[in-house]
Amino acid sequence: MGPHSGGTEPDYRFTLANERTFLAWLRTALGLLAGGVAVHQLVPRPVAMSSVLAGLCVVLAAILAAGAYPRWRHVQIAMRAGQPLARSSMILVLTAGVFLLMAAAVVLVITS
């Protein structure tokens, strides 16, 4: 079942809000990707720790980008069917990922 088949057309404001949320997840993923590239290019020492921090940024960006479309699609289908929205695990993933990034950044600052 596609996001545009079956059910009734939801209020356009909810559809647009769902789209804005999707785009926000993608913006966050792009920001993390840019941060990972910046850390990799601009933080020379210690190499291992800067590589870990850059890698965490890129992995978290990939997870968010990969999860954004399925989340948008599930919400769109639920709205069309008049069903309650499922809880998103992406918020927990993002929170845990940012916490890991902060911990890695603290280690990087302390060891450099």
Image (cartoon, rainbow, N blue to C red):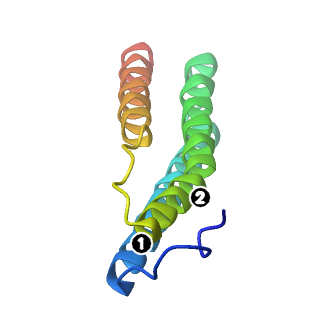
Task: Give the answer, above or below, for where 25 lies relative to 98.
Answer: below
Q: Nearer the viewer, residue 63 or 78?
A: 78
Pick the residue in front: 44 or 25. 25
Graded by Cα atoms within 10 Å as few (under 14), some (14 to 19) or many (20 or more), the crowding at tag 2 reads some
Q: Position of residue 105 (x, y in %)?
A: 41, 27
Q: Which residue is under mark 2?
A: 69
Q: Which mark is residue 101?
A: none
Earlier in the chain: of badge 1 and badge 2, it is 1
What's the residue type where badge 1 is placed?
Arg
**Residue at 54%, 54% in the rendered image:** 68
- Look at the picture and state if 48 lies above or below 17: above
User: Mark 2 is on which residue type?
Assistant: Tyr
Q: Residue at x 55, y 19 (%)?
A: 49
For the C terminus, the quadrant is top left
Q: x, y percentage for residue 24? A: 43, 63
How packed mark 1 is, by other alpha carbons closer than 10 Å (few <14, some 14-19, many 20 or more), is few
* Residue at x 59%, y 69% (from the top left corner): 3
Image quadrant where one finds the N terminus: bottom right
User: Which residue is at the front of the view, 83 or 20?
Assistant: 83
Labels in figure, total: 2
The percent position of residue 80, horizontal first and vertical second, equals 46, 71
Q: Quadrant of residue 97?
A: top left
Q: Nearer the viewer, residue 34 or 98?
A: 98
List x then y, in percent, for residue 22.
48, 64
SS of the residue under disc 2? helix
Q: Residue furthest bottom?
A: 12
Please tell me which residue is depicted at 45% across the width and 66% down the height of the picture. 81
45 is higher (above) or lower (below) than 72:
above
C-alpha distance separating marks 1 and 2: 12 Å
- Residue 20 bears which disc, if any? 1
Element assignment for label 1: helix
Res. 95 image quadrant: top left
